[in-house]
Amino acid sequence: MKLINYIFIFIFIILSFTPSLADNQTGFLVWKENFKKVALDNNISEKTFDKVMANVKFLPNVIKYDRYQPEFYEDTKTYISKRTSSKKFSKGLNFYKENSNLINTIENQYNINKELLLALMGIETNFGTYVGKMDILSSLSTLSFDERRSEFFSNELIILLRLIENNQIDYKTLYGSWAGAFGYFQFMPSTMKNHAIDYDKNGYIDLKNNNDAYASAANYLNKIGWKDDQPCFYKINLSNEVPKKYLNVSAKKLHDKKKLNYFRKYIVNDNILDKRFDNLTAALITPDKDIIPNAENLSPAYIVFNNYEIILKWNRSLRFSLAVCTLKDKFKDEL
């Protein structure tokens, strides 16, 4: 059966078990009343809650987007090629030329290379030209109401309400992705809280401003451990002798990690691997196994390092991390 048929079956199953819109709207109103109690228990003032949540709505499309993300159905080659195209690359070079003073300053200040920052901004928002148009408060409320990841999104919504209460963010500007991410680098509220910076010292964090956005992204990457002098991944050819237990197909947590040198015996083209990194901890991933019926276990395959896992903390998707590092390397060859 072709992949497209599996996709249609997947969508049909989702729609078959999705409650009616009327039921969801009624349930959402009940959720909103109950969530207000949770917010007040978490020291959100009633004044803030009533003001900010007054126009929050249940958004059915958010549930559809959550169930049908590109990471769930696009094979690795397609996913990467779409996000690292020559058009995006050229746009990134032009963006760098226009903002080189700021980007170079941020690079030196936070020890995060400019190519990585450009790659992340390019893939997340096409260099700030598409930051999303969804009402983030409604998106997070919808996902909190939904049962799939309710706890996670409820926590993000509480954090966002607290940022608003503390006058760190203007709630009237909160338009972004369907998942509640915001700004040029698509920060979730918890990331805003822990890593966003008022770089231009104007008393307000604006993640749709190059100064605050770039400094916040660099600060985040620095704090979670990105190392400029270490690799992200190598694309490899695996031998048939590689034990299947070493093959990671999920981004939730990479398992069975070993030193690069250990894995060399299973890598046919190990001559491409820099011996300087032999003692770095690595993992093997075969990202297409989980989405393509009857896919070969061993192709495509990659050996990934700590920097790759750092990008997983940004977005827990095997393909996203591969795309970011691929675009980063393209910029590195040019800048």
Image (spheres, rainbow, N blue to C red):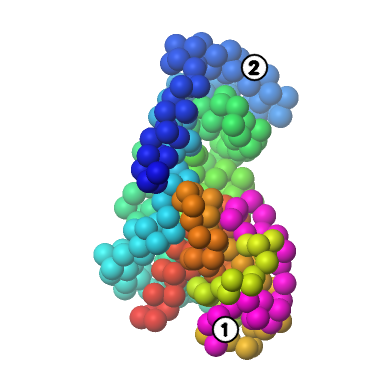
The one nearer the camera, 195 or 65, is 65
Q: Distance between the residues labelled 2 and 1?
A: 57 Å
**Which residue type does callout 2 highlight?**
Asn
Residue 270 badge: 1
Badge 1 marks a residue whose secondary structure is helix
Q: Is residue 269 magenta?
A: yes
Provide residue 170's location: percent of width, then percent of height. 48, 38
Identify the mark nearer the N-term, 2 or 1: 2
Q: Which residue lies at the image location 67% right of the left edge and 55% below the top edge?
A: 253
In this rendering, the answer to whether 258 lies above or below 229 is above
Q: In this view, does 326 lie to the left or right of 224?
A: left
Crowd tier of the residue under label 2, counting other residues whose Cα lies within 10 Å: few below 14, some 14–19, many 20 or above: few
Q: Does the magenta stretch include residue 297?
A: no
The residue labelled by disc 2 is 34
What span is in magenta? 248-271
Q: Which residue lies at the image location 61% right of the left edge and 34% below the top edge?
A: 149
In this rendering, the answer to whether 306 lies above or below 48 is below
Q: Marks 1 and 2: in contact by CB < 8 Å?
A: no
Crowd tier of the residue under label 1, counting other residues whose Cα lies within 10 Å: few below 14, some 14–19, many 20 or above: some
Q: Nearer the viewer, mark 2 or mark 1?
A: 1
The one nearer the camera, 230 or 287, is 287
**Which residue type does callout 1 highlight?**
Asp
Q: Can the viewer see residue 238?
A: yes
Badge 2 marks a residue whose secondary structure is helix
